[in-house]
Amino acid sequence: MESPVKNTQGQSRLFLAILISLIVGFTTGVVVTVYKAPSILSKMPQAQQQGPSPDEIARHIKHMEGEAAKNPQDVKGWIELGNAYFDGEIPDKAINAYLKALALSPDNPDVLTDLGVMYRRNKQLDKAIETFDKAAKIDPTHIQSRFNKGVVLFHDMNDKAGAIKAWEEVAKLQPAYPISTGQTIQQLLESIK
């Protein structure tokens, strides 16, 4: 009886075909992952950073109110209390806390700028502009006060020319100043002129 003859040449070809298919499949997978994954990921919604919860803000406000009552001459305490009210979107109380901080230390352009934002939220637009101007006068390189002035002029007071002037001052100080839309201040100016 004859023993069956193995077809080793056919098996080798089959093995080689399987190996080549695996290599091609793997390479295709890598290429698709490298080139397609970024576009797929960019379409997925970005996770937003979670800020403090309303309960955390309320606890922080309560704590800072206690600190301000214990140490009424502590400028930093009043600023932190104002910031807590700012975060809690309580403009009236933020304004009062910032004014107390400024009574103790009047030349703080950052506090003046935050105060201006609170005046804006409180619909006191003229006071907001006045406060941003004061911050810019104290620190001629203070960008945020100038930018915020432009926001109030453009969006709230419909003063496009005034906003452009404020934002041109920002662009002189820092042409690549980034804004929340992803543009630079220079690009914003070019788009609205």
Image (spheres, grey):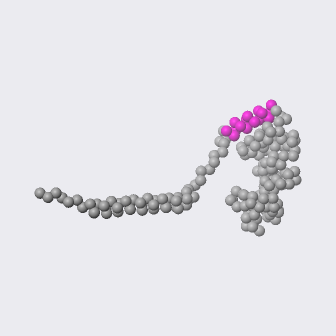
Q: Which residues are magenta?
A: 56-70
**Majority SS type along the magenta span:** helix
Magenta span contains residue 63: yes
- Visible residue check, residue 127: no
Going 78% across and 42% down the picture, which residue do you hit?
82
Going 79% across and 61% down the picture, which residue do you hit?
171
Going 80% across and 31% down the picture, which residue do you hit?
70
Res. 3 image quadrant: bottom left
In this view of the protein, which residue sits in the foreground, 27 or 129? Answer: 27
**x then y, percent, for residue 12:** 31, 61
Quarter the C terminus occupies: bottom right
In this view of the protein, which residue sits in the foreground, 47 or 27? Answer: 27
Going 38% across and 62% down the picture, which residue do you hit?
20
**x then y, percent, for residue 62:** 73, 35
**x then y, percent, for residue 21:** 38, 61
- Visible residue check, residue 73: yes
Res. 45 image quadrant: bottom right
Q: Is residue 55 left or right of residue 71?
A: left
**x then y, percent, for residue 46:** 59, 53
In this view of the protein, which residue sits in the foreground, 71 or 58? Answer: 71
